Amino acid sequence: MKNEDIIVKMQEQINKGLEEVAAAQKEATEIFANMAEQFSPQKNLEEMIQFQEDAFAGFQTLIDLTAEDVATDQLEKEVVFGIGKMTLVHYKPLVEASKVSKSPLMITYALINRQTMLNLQDDRSVIKSLLEAGNDVYMIDWGYPTAEDKYMTIDDHVNWYMDECVEYIRKATGAKKVNLMGICQGGTFSTIYTACHQEKVNSLITLVTPIDFETNDGLLFRWGKDLKIDSMIDHYGVVPADVMNFSYLILKPLTLSFDKYVKMVPKMHDRKFLENYMRMERWTFDSPDQEGETLRQFVKDLYQGNKLVKGELVVGDYTVNLKNITCPVLMACGDADHLVPLAASEKFVEYVGSDDATYMHFKTGHIGMFTSSKSQKEIVPNIVEWLTKRR
Amino acid sequence: MFDPIKEQQKLMETWTENMKKMATPDFEEMQKAMFPNMDAMKAMYGDAQENAKKMYEEMQAKVKEMYEEAQAKAKEMYGEMPSYEEYMKKFTEMFPMMDDYAKLFEVKVPGLEMYNQLFDFYKGVMNPEDFAKNLQENYNKMMTSFIQNAIPNADVAELFKQPQELTEMCVKFYQNMMRPWMQLDEELVKNVLNGDADAAIKFFSEIGDRYEATFGKVVKMMNLGINMEAANEQQAAMDAYYKMMFSAGKLSAIMTKSNNANVQTLTETYKNMMKEGQKVSTFREFYDLWYNTSEKAMEDLFATAEFSKAFADFTDKYFLYLTASNKVVERNLSSLPIPTNKDMEGLYKTVYDLRKAVRDLQKEVAALVAAKAAPAPKAPKAE
């Protein structure tokens, strides 16, 4: 092609492009002219004044609110055991001594966020429901790691800390076996523990727990596969909680960083609403830092290697085999869970060696499993009933 | 006000100067020149309070502006209305503790600056021709502002806000520094400067690859002499910085592309609403339209393999850069009577190993005590 022809062709393309831009701009101008016509000064003014009034009324409520008003985990309990920064708490039974089960329950929460989620407030407390059903409830509090904990591994959490807690409970109660309940990552830990120490476990309850990491449903699972975690862990040692919080906020960036506050303003004047809101807000950002070696293995062996399901996960002296789990097993999930999608949990009951494995799923999200009104009315009663039959 | 982009530019300029000085024995001077910038880099993590205050002040100004605009428009239709000052005075009388509320407002509600920015964007509708003309640019500015202000002040978030502004800087850097070492398609470079997001994605991919084989070799060139390790570490930090910048540019380009697509979605959605007879007559209604389309656009973008890989690469390069620059800082702190991270690392490992050794010994002791306490097995009877 001659140079002149190339120039003509280029000119034609440029003209075509300019025409397209002009047409698009004309169309957009018409659209926005229409929007300008629809603009209602009165409605806008009313809206603005209402927003201001709501905000000031809301702050009047907020200014009177104290940390004590929004305290969580208020049920009576006692620290009975501890290693390092981890403590084991024992909740005071809510039924008479003769009605307390002889088969104790140990709850393990994730390292991310705090176990107080299970006892956020009196009318939305999973712990309270378990106690009222006669369970003898112990719960692990992992504490707040600092730089010196950077070398802590999954093996340390499972085969050291969890095992010593189970040993303590067995000794304190005289029970040969303990019922385990694990939440989210705590469920993964409880599963690994049961596979390694089946002889000490009576039943295993896993809630919103990731087991099968093959799926790409949910952004964490999508991103987790590409994440190059080594540079982050090598830099931090113990990864600051805010890095984790940021990762969770950008899963729904506008909703969690912005819209939830805009939507809060009109309801802020309602003290009860604000108390509940602030409890959740405090819980959301009450996040421990993450021990680097544990996070490194969790990302590489599970999110990227899916080794738990493949039977290739090595934790200390153990190669974890899910078929070793022969006790009764319950997996319960939320259909709308954006952190742990159903695909990561639903087949768990097929992977274990147990003849008594139950899968339940509810119309709720990751946190809604524990704090929603559905939780108290439907989810927790189902879990309690399952456990009562097997403890 | 600390400007991270300017500081990084300064850092690069200093480094360029220092490269020249490498030929001289003036190494101490080079280090001195390097460190004010390093300190400034650190400072970028600390102005959240200032931002919160600014956010509150701007919101108040915007509310006043909005009130006055609405008041002017309403005057024709509904007659005289109280002035903003009168309106606020009434509020003050109703709420005597208003100053306290104002202070609370400064820090208690995140994201309000974004609300203001969105309002400004919406206000543009009053001038439809300019609005349509500058739609893309204004929208990108607004979304950049969201990333800068609404995301919490974690380390990653701090850097996450920079990619939006890195493209131009990186192209300039290419033209001024790297061009003699590598030749990229000039048409591509022009398109990047004209705001073509696809071209920018390609540009940052190519420049990253070519850097390794050309200019990067100069940056990583080994040094000689007594300070060679220190100089090597400084250059390694610069090398990590360039790689992070290329990666950030690519991520920025991918996000810009998504923002562009979202503007189209927003106008399309509005067009459909018009067809169905739905109105957008207030800011709140516009907000709902924006929120629903933008959140969906972001979720769709984040779920793509392209974003996931670019985001992973960027965070990797970011932490590699931090580690490399911290090494430089640590070396320079080593002469002071304070323990550095390197010293603490050894201590942490020793404590960890000792804790496990104590645990094992405790178990052994417990087993021995239990064995001792158990009744001795009876000796077999003599025949």
Image (cartoon, helix red, strand yellow):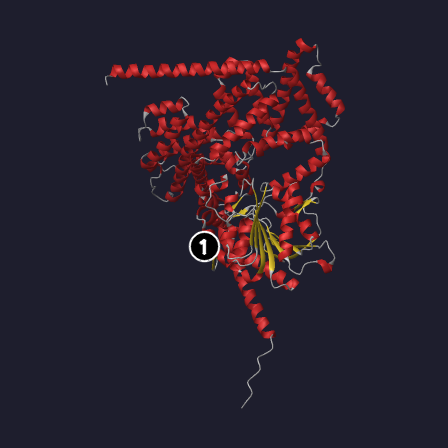
Q: Say which amino acid is labelled 1.
A: Gly
Asked whether residue B215 appears in the rendered view, the answer is no
Q: Is residue B46 above or below residue B336?
A: above
- Considering every residue shown, the one lying at the far bottom of the view is B383
Left or right: A248 in relation to B78: left
- Considering every residue shown, the one lying at the far left of the view is A2
Q: Quadrant of residue B68?
A: top right
Query: Is disc 1 surrounded by few (<14), some (14 to 19) or many (20+) residues within 10 Å?
Result: some
Q: Chain of mark 1?
A: A
Determine the residue positioned at 51% across, 50% down.
A348
Q: Position of residue B235 (x, y in %)?
A: 39, 38
Could you tell me how many numbered marks the image carries? Answer: 1
Q: Quadrant of residue B169?
A: top left
> Which residue has dot 1 on it?
A311
Q: Give whichever of B283, B276 is nearer the camera.
A: B276
Q: Is residue B16 above or below residue B377?
A: above
Q: Position of residue A315 (x, y in %)?
A: 48, 56
